Image (spheres, grey):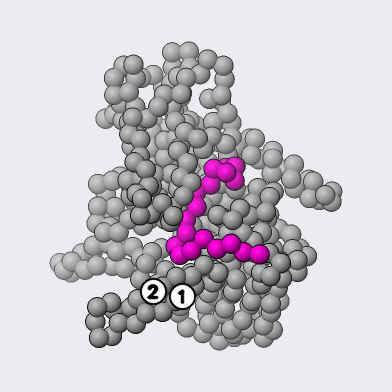
Amino acid sequence: MQRRELLLSGATAGIAMASGRAFAQSATPGDKLIAWIDIPPPVPEPLQNVVRGITRWEDLGSWITPNDKWFSIAHYERPQIDPKTWRLAISGLVARPTTLTLDQLRALPRKEITSTIECSGSNGLPFAQSMIGNATWTGVSLAETLRAAGIKDDGIEVVFYGIDKGDETVRPGTPLEYKYTANFARSMPIAEAMNPANLLCYEMNGSPLPAANGFPVRLIVPGWYGVANVKWLTRIEVLNKRYLGRFMGRDYVTIREEQHDGQTIMAETTVGHMLLKSAPGKIVQRAGRYQIDGMAWGPAVAAVEVKIDNGPWTKATLDASKSEYTWRFWHLDTSLTPGEHAVTSRAIDTAGKIQPAMDDPIIMNKKTYWESNGQITRHVNIA
């Protein structure tokens, strides 16, 4: 490794160690993990090929999530890709259409960023309680790659296509029914695509991307829900109109009931940036006291508060990490009496905005399970 890469590697490790202190404090001799009693059910059989590798909160104990503890979502097939024949095409409204091999991509200037990715369906379904992880991603700058291709003046949208594909049907059961095969794809406005944090990523935590997480190349767009971080990337296209494929215009759409002038309407918005959120992770007994550990993430986390049963909100200790796109660990030292208890956390951002309660209208009036950032309550029984 070159000296610069060694320094970056050491800095990343140092940040991980410093940011993981809240959970590391729970790993002392004599500690006893107190199991939650509200264990999520397993993934239903029809979805077991779609959703894999959900790791329990109790097992997400390090600031950097190891590759083997990452969840994986596949909307169509799970492709097996030969890196020697893989290509990335950059086309559409660009002055210099480009096709890159993996070797050519890896020869471009390397860039690293650490970011947390959460599935937008996390906590929206009973089994989907902890579809989240934090990793250091390595690749090349998406913005610089697009600049090299030369986006034309009339381009407004960038579409990212995965190799994975499946069958789609529009207006099924009607005379207008149409069946076709489509690649997974997501898009964003050019201004969002040009965020310098975005990567065309080929390494995860210092190793090649796992097959389940997008090998050989995936898109990393820090601060966006997982669906926008397109896996198994194969094509980037610049358009002069909005892209409204299935995963932009029909699926991954949040539908919320709203009141306008005394009338009830259904507001529909596509899933985009991650929302303010936190979760209790685990409880450890130590010398007659209890430490509650958890994570908080989303834009501009400033504080976390914890409530036990119907007691007051108590400010937790939040770790010192200021990484813009990563989760932050928190912990609360407390006493718990014998019996069953409910533990709830809520995150607060720098503007004073509070993670909504489950009975908040913004959560209660949501009719789809995407973007479920309501306060999470876990239950424990103290013997």
Contact, CB < 8 Å: mark 1 with mark 2? yes
Q: Which residues are magenta?
A: 65-82
Q: Position of residue 60 (x, y in %)?
A: 51, 38
| Residue 383 appears in view | yes
Residue 78 among magenta residues: yes
Quarter of the image where one finds residue 212? bottom right
Name the residue nearer the viewer: 5 or 85: 85
Residue at the image point whose x is 74% and y is 41% from the top: 10
Give SS at disc 1. strand
The picture places residue 200, in percent across and down from the top left corner, at: 64, 64
Disc sitting over residue 255 in the figure: none
SS label for mark 2: strand
Tell me the CA gap for discs 1 and 2: 7 Å
Percent x, y of residue 86: 66, 69
Which residue bears the numbered disc 1? Answer: 182
Q: Nearer the viewer, residue 191 or 80?
A: 80
Task: Look at 29% across and 19% down and name the residue there.
Answer: 339
Q: Residue flagged by tag 1: what amino acid is it?
A: Ala
Give how far across and how far down residue 148 sits, in percent. Answer: 71, 76
Q: Amino acid at mark 2?
A: Glu
Residue located at (59% from left, 46% from top): 67
Q: What secondary structure is the magenta-colored segment mainly?
A: loop
**Label 2, on which residue?**
168
In the image, 70: left or right of 280?
right
Q: Residues within 10 Å of mark 1 (few under 14, many from 20)?
A: some
